[in-house]
Amino acid sequence: MSNNIVTIYEPTLDEVNGYMNNRLNADPWFDATEDDQLKAISTAIRSINNLSLDKSINSEQGIIDTIAAVSEVCISLLDGVDPSKEIDSVNVISRSFVSSKVTYDKRTVPEHTKAGIVSPIAWNILWPYLIANLSLSFIRVT
C-alpha cells in the first residue's frame, strides 16, 4: 500500500446535472439553487477525498464512478441529511410504543456514516476503490 494521497476527479456542475437527468427522484437537486448545488458538489468532493482511495479511482471507469458517487452524496445533502446528526439517528436498535422507550447502541453505526459518506449508494459505488482496513463488527444479541 502506498502512502501517496489520492484525490478524486472533481466533477463539474454540467457532469452532475447529466447524472441527475438520468436519476429517478432527483427533485432535491433540481429544486436547489445553483449556488447550493455547487456547495453540495464541493462538500461531496471533500468528504470523498477524506477516504483512503486506490489510484484506480482516477481511471476512466473510476471517473465515471466518481461522478455518480459525488452526485449521490449531493442528493443526500440537498435532501437534508446532516452528517453530524446521522450518527446519532442510526443508533436506534429498539423502540417501544407503550411508554415511548427507545434504545440506542453506538456500535451499530454503518461504515459509510462513520467514514463521513452520507449516501449508502455513494458508499457502494466507492467501495471497490477503498484501500483502508475495514472490518466487520458482529454484536451478539441474546
Image (cartoon, rainbow, N blue to C red):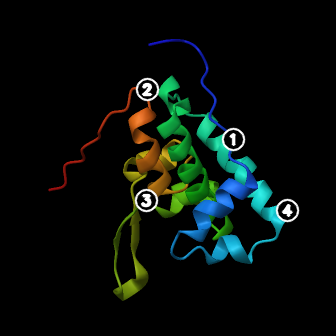
The residue under label 4 is 35
Q: Are marks 3 and 1 in contact (CB under 8 Å)?
A: no
Q: CA distance from mark 1 to mark 4?
A: 17 Å
Q: Residues within 10 Å of mark 2 (few under 14, many from 20)?
A: some
Locate residue 9 relative to residue 36 in the image: left or right.
left
Locate residue 141 relative to residue 46 in the image: left or right.
left
Q: CA distance from mark 4 to mark 3?
A: 33 Å
- Counting from the top left corner in percent of width and height, residue 23 is at 53, 69
The residue under label 1 is 10
| Quadrant where the image shows the C terminus | bottom left
Q: Which residue is nearer to you in this view: 127 or 30?
A: 30
| Quadrant where the image shows the N terminus | top left
Vertical relation: 50 (above or below) 122: above
The numbered mark, 1 or 4, whose residue comes first in the sequence reads: 1
User: Which kind of residue does numbered mark 4 sit on?
Assistant: Asp
The numbered mark, 4 or 2, whose residue comes first in the sequence reads: 4
